[in-house]
Structure formats: structure tokens, C-alpha cells
Amino acid sequence: MCGIVGYIGFRNASDFLLDGLHRLEYRGYDSAGIAVFHKGEVAVRKRAGRVCELDRLIETDGVEGTVGIGHTRWATHGETTDVNSHPHVGGNGEVVLVHNGVVENHNSLRTQLQTLGYVFRTTTDTEVIAHLIAHHLEKRIETDGEICTHEACVEVVETAMRKIEGTYGVAVLFRDCPDLIVAARAGSPLVVGIGRGEYFVASDAGPLVGYTEEVVYLADHEIVALTSESIDLLHRDAGKKSPSIQVLDQVAGDTSLGDFEHYMLKEIYEQPQSIENAMRGRFDESEATAMFGGLNLDPQQLRRVDRVVLTACGTSWHAGLVGEYLLEEFARLPTEVEYASELRYRNPPLTDNTMVFAITQSGETADTLAAMRECKRKGHPTLAICNVVGSSIAREADGGIYLHAGPEIGVASTKAFTSQVTVLTLLALYLGRMRHLSYPAGRRMIDQLREMPDKLRKALTCHDAVREVAAKYHGFNNFLYLGRLYNFPVALEGALKMKEISYIHAEGYPAAEMKHGPIALVEEKTPSIFVIPRGGIYPKVMSNLEEVRARCGPVIAIACEGDDTVADLADDVIFVPDVEEYLQPLVTSIPLQLLAYHVALLRDCNVDRPRNLAKSVTVE
Ligand code: F6R
């Protein structure tokens, strides 16, 4: 995780660096820091806490200069203290750097460097890189009797990075070369922005929006040397390359809070609009199907697909589970949903005609990227369902479908989930119409999908009822979330939302599985949240609900409007609009998002920035 930025040019560097760090804060918010060439030396300012803490520090102890680097941290090695914050200093201050990634062999390198006399000031893995670069610089100057030149700086970064096992995106300043930034990447994304008389570096394109429209995405093992007037790119093995300049097609999305108190609440309320955006322009009325611009596969290839693998992490994995049910029901395609963190190291037999979809909001999740690369390596068409335009996964996939949900800033994913489910429904319709799904069935799905933004608006009117339920139950420490078929993934997702923002232990289960173990947890202090809208399996879920009641477990039901039977049985009920079963996740997930939100508020938790988490998980 972590976000890094760099600037070299004519502006006050700290203005860009701080602005960029705010935009990258979704990647981590344990600490933040910058280093700027200031009055002939590299001045470092860093502090544990959010970027706004760093803003305050800079207000009182500013640094002026036109070259600098910055970092916002999600701690992997070493506590979240001022001293462990980046930038880190190597040697006697010859090298200052920021790093996103993990140095897996940091222990052995640390021992070697300590033997050579290097003194470690922090408990981070990153300091190893700083000393290693300083060491190679010192050696080179000693051997060649050379002063610190640009070429020497690039070379020593290259030599040092060859010794690193793990992942990195780094930006490095050299005390004796004040007009240079060297940046390098392996596994952690880096993008260079090209201006007139200035260059920018960032972990993703977000910080560059509004500063430049020309970018170079670095590939693994590329190193770039930037001065205010030049960019030199080389690949560790292939040598010098000319940079491939692309146009940044990212526009600054709406990142304001508007009238909302938190991003999470704003994003929950954006869902009628965001699912509409996911559908816009994607219906082919005359063929009663969906259409996508970017799959990059012709109908023949798509017809030959005989199996689908959906791979993702967290909430996106839950959306994938809904996708599995949809693709199997409507397209009759055998579908598997794989945790990306498992798939990347497993070797499941995949047929030649298996199509792989990586599902990701950020497009930067390290495990999802690695799983996608592994499938690509084996020759499968690998596509992405992604929100962030220009992200690593969006760029590396063979094709894909954007969510168009707009920026999701709250760490707990909400609107991305419903947009992913919407896109997967369109995909099931599209692949279904190429196979067994009839024209009238396709028309019906289109009509039903078109109604969903209004259904979501209606679902949001449960807000007051949810607030009351939250007030009643926020003191409980264990929750069960139970649902079946399309609502099983919703139960998992509801439990995840509760865990991650209110720190309450919550388990999601298929309602009928409960009697194979988890029912032992049921007692007066363990509420069960039943996702029980009407549908084919309703009487079965009702029996499961009775089983919990018989053991004195409090029951909160998410049910269809007007369902008096459930209302009579449950201790509390929250109503959602009645929709077709395959569309239920879009409405039933809303009260669960709101419930997690209100419980977290009542427990005084930081809703948008929950502890230990980051919006984009760019480490393994
Ligand atoms: C939970 C949440 C995470 C993400 C997961 C994957 O609310 O946000 O579980 O869903 O880290 O992230 P993306 O979708 O960006 O790959």
C-alpha cells in the first residue's frame, strides 16, 4: 500500500506533494512525510497520523524548494511512529527516499549493512533500501574517484534494487545531485507526469489530474531519471528505452463531501446514480441483450468460452459470488470465484476456453493483479471489471468493463459493490443471449434492470428504520448474517461491512449451513440478521429463522415491503422493495451498509478511515 509522489520543476514542490498525498491518502493514512531540497540541503518533514497532521507541521515549519518527494504510509514493517514515517535517509544523508512495497529480505540485508557500519534509525524495511543505495554510491565514488553524477545515481539505484526481494515503487533524492529524482518500480505502480519544464511522479494518476495530461506508466524493473528538463528511462535488463507517452484520460471526479457527514454515507446515497451509470449505453434493445465496448473479443471467441473464473478480493470477491450465480443461471456457464490471493499461487486446471475476469474497484490490488498476470501467462483471455480508469489492472487486462461509479473514497466499499453486481448482471445477459437465453427473457431482464435505480432510491428510505435498529443493537459484540442463494453473498458482505468499520465480530453464512456449527453461537446476546426477501427459497429461510428464534437469538430481518409474516416473527424488521430474486442483492445490501455505518458512528469509530485498513491493498 502507501502512496508516493515526487516533483521536479519550477513550482513550490511542497504544494504539489501535499495535494498529491491528500489524493493518495486512500492508500494508507498511518503517517505522512515529504523531503524537499531547501537552502542547499534535503529537508525532511514527517509525522505519524493523517496527511492533515503533516499540513499542520508544514504550516509552522515549511520547506521551500522546487524538487521533492512525499509519502503517505500504510505500515507493514515497524510501528506507526514519527521516526518510522517516510522519507527515510540512507548513509549520512546522501540518499533520501520514499517507498511503496515490501522488502522481503530486509532482515539479511539489514545484518549485512550493519556489519558494514550502517546505523539503522528505524524499524522499517525501507531503511534497508536507503542504506543500500548509499552504500553502492559510496563504493562507486571510492572506486572511480568520481563525484556524484546523474549516471552514477541511476546506476547505484539499479544495482541496489537488484538485491531487493519483494516489491517496490521508490522515488529517490541524492543530496549531491539537487536537480534529480530517480524513481524505480517492481510490483508497485508508478506513473510519471510530463509537464513543460517540470515532471511529476505518483503511485497512480490521481495526483497528476489538473497538472498534466501526458503520462508514462512505468513497467516493472524500469528506472527513470528526471530533471526539470529531461526524462531518461531504462529497463534493468533491456537498457535505455524511449518512454511511451500516453494521454491521461482520467478526469477529476467529484471528491467533495457535499451535504454528507462522511464519504461512506455519500457513496451509499450515490448508488441509484452509480448503477445507472454502470448501465448507461449498454443495452441493445433490438437484440434484447447488453453491449460492451471494451471486451476486445469477437463473438466467435466469446461463444467458445466454456468456463468463467472470477477473481477478486474482499467486497469485490463478494460481488464475484453474485456473478457466479448470475452467469450460471442466465448464461449456463460453469463459473468459479477465486480469492486472488489463493489463485496467484494455485495451479487449477483451466480449459483453453476459460475466460478470466479480475473484479476490482481500485484496479491496484496486488493479489488481484498477480492472479490476473498468472492467468494471462497461461494464455487465457483476462479481462477486468474495474472502476479506476488507467489503473494497473485496467491497463494490463486484455479488455474489460468499467464501472463508471466515480471516485469511491470511503475505505468501506459500497457503491463499487452494487456497480460490480450490475455489470455482472449485464454480462450474464450478454453471454446468456449468445447461448440459451431467449429474446423475451432478455427483454424482461432489460426492463427489470431499468427499474433498479428507482428501486434503490426506494430502498434508501429504510434509513430511519436502520437508525433505530442500530441504536438498539450497537452495544452487542457478535452478529450473525444469514442469507441463501443470491442473498448469501449479501450476508457475507453485510458482515464484512460491520467488521471493518465498527470492529464488531460478525460472521456471514448461508442460512442453512448455520445448523452445522455456527448455531452454537446463537444466544440472547448474538443477534442474527436474516436477509429474507420473498422468493423461491423463502419458506426454507423462514425455517432457519425459526431455528434461531427457538434458541432465543434476537432476529433482525431484511424483508420485502408488506411482509407481515416476517415482521411478526422477527424482533426487528427493515423493509426493502420487492424485486426479482436475481436483482435482490442490489436492494438488500443497502440496509446492511447503512446498519454498519450507524453502528460504527454510535461506537465512535472513524467510518471513512477504519483502523488498520487502506482503500487500496497494494501489498501481498
Ligand atoms: C471492503 C473493501 C475491501 C476491497 C478489497 C478489494 O469494504 O473495500 O475488501 O473490496 O480490498 O479491493 P479492490 O476492489 O480495489 O480490488
Image: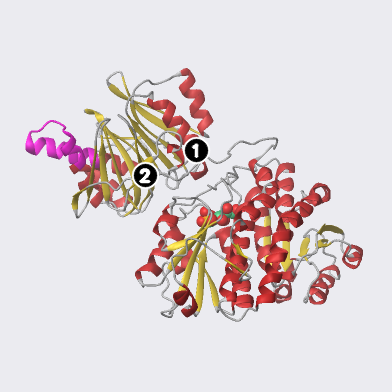
- Residue at position x 47%, y 55% from top? 365
- Residue placed furthest toward the left: 144
Classify residue 128 as left or right of residue 523.
Answer: left
Classify residue 559 as left or right of residue 109.
Answer: right
Q: Give yes or no for contact between labels 1 and 2 (Cβ–Cβ under 8 Å).
A: no
Q: Position of residue 345 (x, y in %)?
A: 41, 68
Q: Position of residue 114 (x, y in %)?
A: 25, 42
Classify residue 55 as left or right of residue 120.
Answer: right
Provide the residue designation for mark 1.
Answer: 23
Classify residue 319 as left or right of residue 199.
Answer: right
* Image quarter of residue 116: top left
Decide: few, some or many residues near mark 1? Use Cα within 10 Å; few <14, some 14-19, many ≥20. many
Our reading of the magenta stretch's main secondary structure is: helix
Q: Amino acid at mark 2?
A: Val
Q: How is the image coloured?
A: secondary structure
Q: Position of residue 587 (x, y in %)?
A: 73, 59
Provide the residue designation for mark 2.
Answer: 191
Quick one: 243 or 279, which is closer to the camera? Answer: 279
> Is residue 149 inside the magenta stretch?
yes
Quick one: 581 or 609, which is closer to the camera? Answer: 581
Quick one: 281 or 517, which is closer to the camera? Answer: 281
Decide: few, some or many residues near mark 2? Use Cα within 10 Å; few <14, some 14-19, many ≥20. many
- Residue at position x 29%, y 39% from top? 130
Label 2 CB-ligand 1 distance < 8 A: no
Quadrant of the frame with the C terminus: bottom left
Q: Does dot 2 land on a helix, a strand or a loop?
A: strand
Q: What stretch of residues is rendered in magenta? A: 133-154
> Is residue 20 inside the magenta stretch?
no
Is residue 117 visible to us here? no
Q: Position of residue 76 (x, y in %)?
A: 44, 48
* Image quarter of residue 286: bottom right
Q: Amino acid at mark 1?
A: Arg
